[in-house]
Image (cartoon, grey):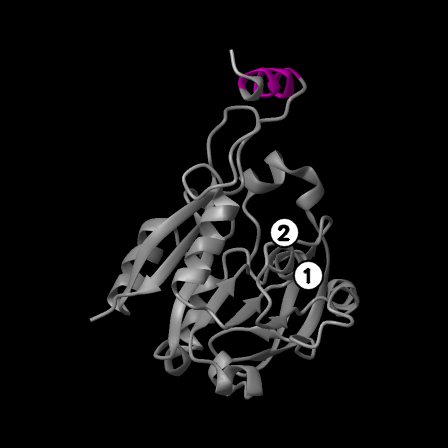
Amino acid sequence: MTILHSIKELALKAGVEVNWYIPGQSDTARLFKLLDFHKIDTVIDVGANDGGYGKALRRGGYSDAILSFEPLESAHVKLVHASRGDVAWEIAPRMAIGSSNGEIEINVAGNSYSSSILPMQSLHEALVPQSRYVGTEKVPLNRLDAVAHPFIEQSNNLLLKIDTQGYELPVLEGAESLLKRVRGIQLEMSLVPLYEGQMLYKETIDWLEAKGFELWSVMPGFVDRTSGRMLQMDGVFFRVQS
């Protein structure tokens, strides 16, 4: 038995799985390989919450532009703090992103990151009781196509990342013009309904294929710990190159 195998066995006994940091074994390593391969120079982070995705990008070595959007007041404060001192990471004013411009009410979840414009399904509440809605906030609503920012205008290879808890389709519908310039898209895809009226994974794949994007990678997300069933995953899509 090699030293590595011994370490892996000890780690498993402690509830930790050890793998090589390579695209074939690590979701994170695969994502950064994709970003590098497609020369992504700007990430539009819709539904940034407290900045976890942006911080993960920086830890992984991505040093180019990030433009983050977050509607919730408390999360937006944390997001601004997370980006402090990073001149290549800018935070848009508080707003939700969707298919129209105006104002909308967002449901605030107890755990913040499960917050959504859509009503939550009982399955979601049952599996994660702390995700139950505890209030609402009215926020500005804007189409991405209506947002002007130097990061977007100067980019050659945009990645649009969407984490809006079932509200992905309105975000995409409000970015029809921008999508023509987008190189890649990373978004949550649900295998089962977790929010009322959301688009499920098959519809998501079909919708994006019709817009000229193909699925390059998936990353496990929300899992039912009791049964082991996967309920959500992230899909990473890139534009079909002619």
Q: Residues within 10 Å of mark 1 (few under 14, many from 20)?
A: many
Left or right side of 25 for 214: left
Q: Which quadrant holds residue 147?
A: bottom right
Residue 119 horizontal/vertical position (percent): 57, 55
236, 26: nearer the viewer: 26
58 part of magenta stretch: no
Residue reaching furthest to the top: 1
Rendered view: 27 above or below 150: above
Q: Residue at x 57, y 41 (%)?
A: 124
- The mark closer to the camera, 2 or 1, is 1
Q: Which quadrant holds residue 236?
A: bottom left
Rendered view: 60 above or below 100: above
Rendered view: 99 above or below 208: below
Which disc number belongs to residue 51? 1
Q: Secondary structure at mark 1?
A: loop
Q: Secondary structure at mark 2?
A: loop
Q: Residue at x 34, y 53 (%)?
A: 216
Which disc number belongs to residue 151? none
Q: Residues within 10 Å of mark 2 (few under 14, many from 20)?
A: many
Which disc number belongs to residue 114? 2
Magenta highlight range? 5-13
Which tag, 2 or 1, sits closer to the chain's start?
A: 1
Residue 192 horizontal/vertical position (percent): 43, 42
227, 125: nearer the viewer: 227
Rendered view: 113 above or below 151: above
Left or right side of 37 for 8: right
Q: Is any part of residue 149 visible from this angle?
A: no
Quadrant (top left, top right, bottom left, bottom right) of the C terminus: bottom left
Residue 143 horizontal/vertical position (percent): 50, 80
Label 2 – label 1 distance at C-alpha: 15 Å
